Image (cartoon, rainbow, N blue to C red):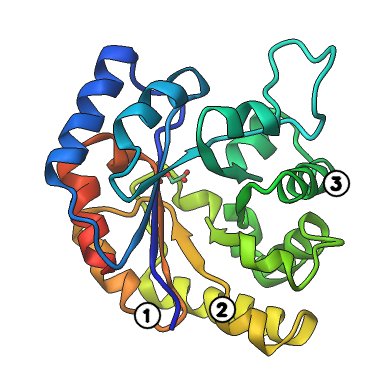
Amino acid sequence: MRTPVVAANWKMNKDLTEAKSLVSELLAGYQDAATEVYIAPPFVFLNEVNQHIKGSGMQLAAQNMNAVESGAHTGEISSSMLKSVGASTVILGHSERRDSYGETDAHINEKVKAALAAGIQVIFCFGEQLAERKSNTHFEVVQSQLASGLAGVTTEDYKHIILAYEPVWAIGTGETASPEQAQEMHAFIREYLRSEVGADVADQTRILYGGSVKPGNAADLFSRPDIDGGLIGGASLQAADFLAIVNAAS
Ligand code: PGA
C-alpha cells in the first residue's frame, strides 16, 4: 500500500505577509491524515514557513537546489542550506526549470544525486510537451527523461524519490490530462520501473500527477490505480482549494 502524497508548489508567488496568512489558513483547516503533505514556498520563505508548520504533519520542500555544496555560485542555494531551514524534500526537474532556465537531463541528474547524497528526498518532475504528445512520442520522451534524470540512482535511493508526471501542456493551462490519459502514462511509468529497477521499487514508488489539478478533478485522478497523489501549482495558492485536494487523496 503506497501512502498518498500531495505537494504544494507555490512557484514564484506570494510575499511574506501573504505566505504567512496562507500558512495559517492551511494550519487552521489541516487534519493530519493518511496523506503526506509537502509545502514548497519560494526559498526566502522556507525558514518562516517551517516555523509555522513544524510539528503539524506537513513537511517543508524547496523548489530547486544547486548540485554543488558551497562556493562561488551567486544566487544559488545548496542542500545543506535547505536542510538547515528544515526542508526534507526538494522538487527537481520541473518543466519550468527545464524550459526557462536551460536545465538539461544531465544537469538535473547531478542535482538528484547531490540531494540524495545529502539525505534530501527528491520530487522528480518530468513530462512531455504538447507537440510530443501530438506526434505520439510521449512515452519515449518520458522514458528518456526518467533514464537520464535518474541515471545512477540505486534501488535503495528510490525510497527517497517521489515521481511527478507533469505533461507540460497541462501545467497552468487549465487543461488537465484526462484521468484515463494520466493513468495510462502512470501505468507505463510503473512498468518501466518494474523492468528497469525491479518489482519492489515499482510497487513502492509514489507517482504523482501534476498539471491543473483542482478540487473538482482531484478525486477522479487520485482514484486511478497508479496515481498516488498530485503536485499542485495554481490551486495550492488558495488554502481551501489545496485542502480539498489533500482530502481527495486520503
Ligand atoms: P498547475 O502547476 O497545478 O498550476 O498546473 C503544476 C506544477 O507545475 O507543478
Q: Report the side of 38 relative to 247 (left or right).
A: right
Find disc 2 in the rendering and name its residue: 204
- Direction from residue 95 to residue 8 in the image, left or right: left
Q: Secondary structure at mark 3?
A: helix
Q: Earlier in the sequence, mark 2 or mark 3?
A: 3
Q: Nearer the viewer, residue 221 or 56?
A: 56
**Residue 94 visible here:** no
- Point out which mark residue 224 bears: 1
Q: Earlier in the sequence, mark 3 or mark 1?
A: 3
- Residue 69 seen in the figure: yes
Which amino acid lies under the numbered mark 3 shown in the image of this protein? Ala
Residue at 48% across, 17% down: 44
Residue situated in front as seen by the camera: 76 or 226: 76
Q: Which of these two is toward me, 220 or 8?
A: 8
Question: What is the count of numbered marks?
Answer: 3
Q: Mark 3 and mark 1: span between their CA atoms?
A: 32 Å
Residue 38: percent from left, percent from top: 41, 47
Mark 2 or mark 3, whichever is nearer to me: 2
